[in-house]
Amino acid sequence: MSFMKLTASALAVAAVSATGAAAQSRDTVQVAGSSTVLPYASIVAELFGENTDFPTPVVESGGSSTGLARFCEGVGEGTIDVANASRAIRDSEIETCAANGVDEIMQVRIGYDGIVFASQIDGPEFTAFEPADWFKAIAAQVVVDGEVVDNPYTTWNEVNPDLPEAEILTFIPGTRHGTREVFEENVLAAGCEATGAMEAFVEHGMSEDDAEDACMAVRTDGVSVDIDGDYTETLARISSNPNGVGVFGLAFYENNTDTLKVATMGGVAPSTETIASGEYPVSRPLYFYVKKAHIGVIPGVKEYAQFFMADEIAGPGGPLANYGLVPDPELAATQSMIENEETM
Amino acid sequence: MTDATASHTPQPGQGGETAKSSLFTVSPRTRRRNASERRFKAYGVTAILLGLLFLCFLVYSILSKGLPAFTRTVAEVELTLTQAQIDEAESTLLKTGAYRDLMIAELGKVLGDVEPDAIQRIVGNPGAMLRNFYTANPDAIGDTVAFELPTASRVDGYFKGRITREGQANSTFLTPADLDLADRMQEEGIIKREFNWQFLTGAEASDDNPVAAGIGVSVVGSLYMMFVVLALSLPIGVAASIYLEEFAPKNRFTDLIEVNISNLAAVPSIVFGILGLAFFIQFAGLPRSAPLVGGLVLTLMTLPTIIISTRASLRAVPPSIRDAALGVGASKMQSVFHHVLPLALPGILTGTIIGLAQALGETAPLLLIGMVGFVALRYPDTIASGFLDSNSAMPAQIYTWAARADQIFYEKAWGGIIVLLVFLLTMNIIAVILRRRFERRW
């Protein structure tokens, strides 16, 4: 019966290919993590495939926390080799990793990236922000006349008379993005200190830790929107809301200068120069983490890390710098660290 | 029924008025009923018109945004590379960059007094293309070869109208002065537009060389997945439904199975992705990002659809066919395989193709098994290895492109949608033709 034969042979093909898969070892480096690092990692992955004999690594996105969580799932072919992150790994994540047998982790700093505050090019004149403006605009609780109250502000000029009279509407990275942590620390916490809210929180009976948490708590009345997707989602929200202000990576902004205008932060305009010199206040290092146990098991893991951090790639004038990365001045130290496979 | 006869039958208590009613004058009640029918028809027409309007809007926006992806801007450059130059380029770490610099130097000679950086902003990063050519054709070293190199994404956007001169005022990737140079190159015939075959045949590319990105490799990935889905879900689905429909006793247990199959058809597809990650990758040890795993996950998703449509078409075969076969002495199995199944086949195939089309457009489960991201990078080396080599799928590729910073990827995402729709439309047309040609009605 031809139908039965067809069925049997199809099942046989599937079974053979499945067993073949289990026997074959993986030869492609698997990378996952931060969507901020994704463009850099995919540029390197492409060049790595074109310029070496190794297959092009697979780079997945999803956010720093997601990437590190998958990185810490364990050791073996079913787990990823490299995690990209736009923040340093947390102690809790190192513990999770160790509990799952991932105890040797190499931390590689790729370079620096600026976080910029941009709005629609034809929208209100958002040209200069201070961390204090952002804290007062979107913190859950602020200090008004010495009292701690729920955030009452609805327009930017109530926060700071120099800002335009426009409704406050911000699009900030969601909590699974590493960018959020940097935003909280360098903008909200800094603004909290600058406005004296931090002291006021402590005076009103909060402990030091609670006051720090209160500084970084974002209001939940819809004025500030968490974006869990990529920067394109933030861009789409900005395009449909003239009053919206979004948080972007510098490289993403530079790719979209025809639709976005950027604001200064603390009086400094974001650029690779001001970020490299440290003048621009909101920048952060970008990292990737390598599972040392996979070096020598999955072909190309160490070579990928070496290629990534080579002067021609991650150094000044290289393709990553062209795309918007601020090169790390301590590149040589990172290179020797990879060479010697030094773990954290 | 009472409504229909009311105007003709005299009602007690209304004698005087109803006696006057005639077929030639329309009573107010009939008028009301006719009006309500007309209103209902108007609602129907409005609904259809609205649907058509949305369809037109959708088709218009897809075509207007996606069609530019099928053309590209190329710069024609004649290049003569010596063995020494090739050797020098091959000795560097970033070989493709060295090839690009050789090409920029050559173009600089043609254009005269122009900065190399400006040329690079216009031609982008064609190094890999040059290197691949010379690796594949070592005989061409020393000869003059004419290359058609795709220009950088923003130059392409400028000639397509996606990018304006004003918009580039603050850009570091392409300055208004570069646009003057690009205009000059177009006047001199160096830059021209042509059909973009690379979009249909090419592989994924990074933000460093976005113009090279094509959907070809992910089409192959999708085809591999569809092959797995077809090879597994058709036999399993048909066998399951024949057993349930023709052989299984009708009891509580089979009822339970039936209810669960219907439930399974309504399960969100992301759930199958989580299942696939946990079972096929973490437990069974199959590789991530492999079309085989994608196919297995989509098989789980497609099975209920196929089982439901197969059972429906088996049920549509009249019992007289079975009775006649059994009556002339055929066994139960003979009656099913010789008579019922061939008659149900058009319906089964239609259901299968629709199930496949649904699976073809699915992204969510692929997100979890590593097929979404920077994945579809090369064609499989052999036909068999295609099941296990890392690959993406068409909808996943579109999703990835839509999230990229460079606007050319947005255009490519819409172009990818057109390609995907062409596939879906073809499959649906095949399903319709099969149904029209082979379906029998009783």
Image (spheres, coloured by chain):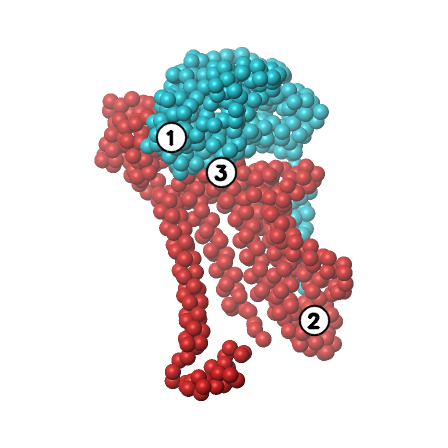
Chain colours: A cyan, B red
| Residue B82 in the figure: left or right of residue A6 | left
Question: Which residue is depicted at the point 52% across and 48% down?
Answer: B361
Residue identifier under label 1: A166
Q: Are marks 3 and 1 on the same chain?
A: no
Q: Nearer the viewer, residue B339 or B112?
A: B339
Q: Nearer the viewer, residue A324 or B11?
A: B11
Sequence order check, earlier mark of 3 and 2: 2
The image quadrant of residue A117 is top left
Determine contact: label 3, label 2, CB under 8 Å: no
Secondary structure, mark 3, is helix
Does the rendering let one see residue A180? no
Q: From the top left corner, tell me how far across and down residue A61 is, in percent.
A: 54, 32
Residue identifier under label 2: B335
Give the position of the N terminus of chain A as an image quadrant: bottom right
Closest to the camera, between mark 2 and mark 1, is: 1
The image quadrant of residue B293 is top right
In the image, what residue type sits under mark 3? Answer: Thr
Question: Which residue is depicted at the point 62% across and 53% down?
Answer: B265
Q: Are marks 2 and 1 on the same chain?
A: no
Determine contact: label 2, label 1, CB under 8 Å: no
- Which subunit holds the residue at mark 3? B
Report the Cα–Cα distance between label 3 and label 1: 34 Å
Does the rendering let one see residue A166? yes
